[in-house]
Amino acid sequence: MASRKEEKERRRQERLAWERQQQEQSRRRRLYSVGAGGVLVVAAAAAIIIAIAAGGGGSGSKGVAGQKLTVKAADPPAQKLTDLNAAAQAADCSLSNPPIEGRVHTTKPVKYHTNPPSSGNHNPVPAEDGAYAKSPSIGHVVHSLEHGRIEIQYRPTISRKRLAELEGLFKQDQYHMLLLPNITHMPFEVAAVAWGHIAGCKRVTNSSFDVVRAFIQRYRDKGPEFIP
């Protein structure tokens, strides 16, 4: 028969074993909580990335940027006409409202049916607002139109004087605007583009600036997906 001392030692050992078991279970619970939390963080981050890619990002969202224009701005010709149709007629510029070609996000090349493109499937990341010396790819540029941006696109061979004046016009009101060289070999020396709308001038004259001004006032922030 065990002595009182032995019985006491046996109970002490049982208590120690029970405490070790509880400590081990507690440690495992903490590890599980940390691991589960890490999984949730990764999942949340992935969800944000997917949402940005699928939803269109925006220029409030961070977009893709190209090489910024460094030409010194000059004052544009003074405004004479404010009505878009009258300004286009006076400047011998064309106005068109081509059918919408789609608005699905894709990283594959897209064939556009207007020049410059005014709608269509496009890259998931838009081009940022700003004045460019080197344009982002056309898929990024079209995405910006979907967000209600106005793009003033100029032929790369435009005179430095006219480019400086376009830069001056851009700087007078840069809100939700892009100024960039055309990369689609458009038939215009300058064109103002919005989602589903184009004003094209085969030659830049003083009157062309009224066309661009009136176009901006009519179509800015009129895209199907407004992104502040």
Image: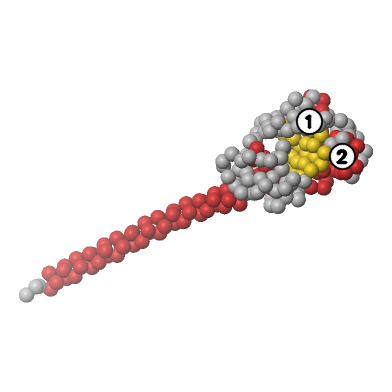
- Residue 133 placement, left or right of 107: right
In the rendered image, residue 145, in percent from the top left (x then y), is placed at 70, 45
Which image quadrant is residue 114 in? top right
Residue position for label 2: 88
Residue drawn at point x = 90 percent, y = 42 percent:
86
* Amino acid bearing label 2: Ala
Q: Name the mark on residue 209.
A: none
Question: In percent of the image, x 83 and y 46: which residue is there?
Answer: 217
Vertical comparison of 32 with 66: above or below = below
Q: Is residue 47 above or below residue 2?
A: above
Residue 201, percent across and down?
82, 34
Residue identified by numbered label 1: 189
Q: How many marks do you count on the picture?
A: 2
Residue that appears at 88% across and 32% down? 206
* Residue 62 percent location from the top left of the image: 63, 44
Q: Nearer the viewer, residue 31 or 175?
A: 175
Q: Position of residue 138 (x, y in %)?
A: 65, 37
Q: Give the camera-side residue of 109 and 212.
A: 109
Task: Estimate how packed mark 2 is, as few (under 14), some (14 to 19) or many (20 or more) residues with alpha carbons within 10 Å.
Answer: many
Is residue 174 something one can see in this rendering?
no
Q: Residues within 10 Å of mark 1 (few under 14, many from 20)?
A: many
- Residue ranking furthest to the left: 1
Q: Mark 1: which amino acid?
A: Glu
The disc, 2 or 1, on the residue closer to the chain's N-terminal end is 2
In space, the residues marked 2 and 1 are separated at their CA atoms by 14 Å
Asked whether 216 or 102 is in front, the reply is 102
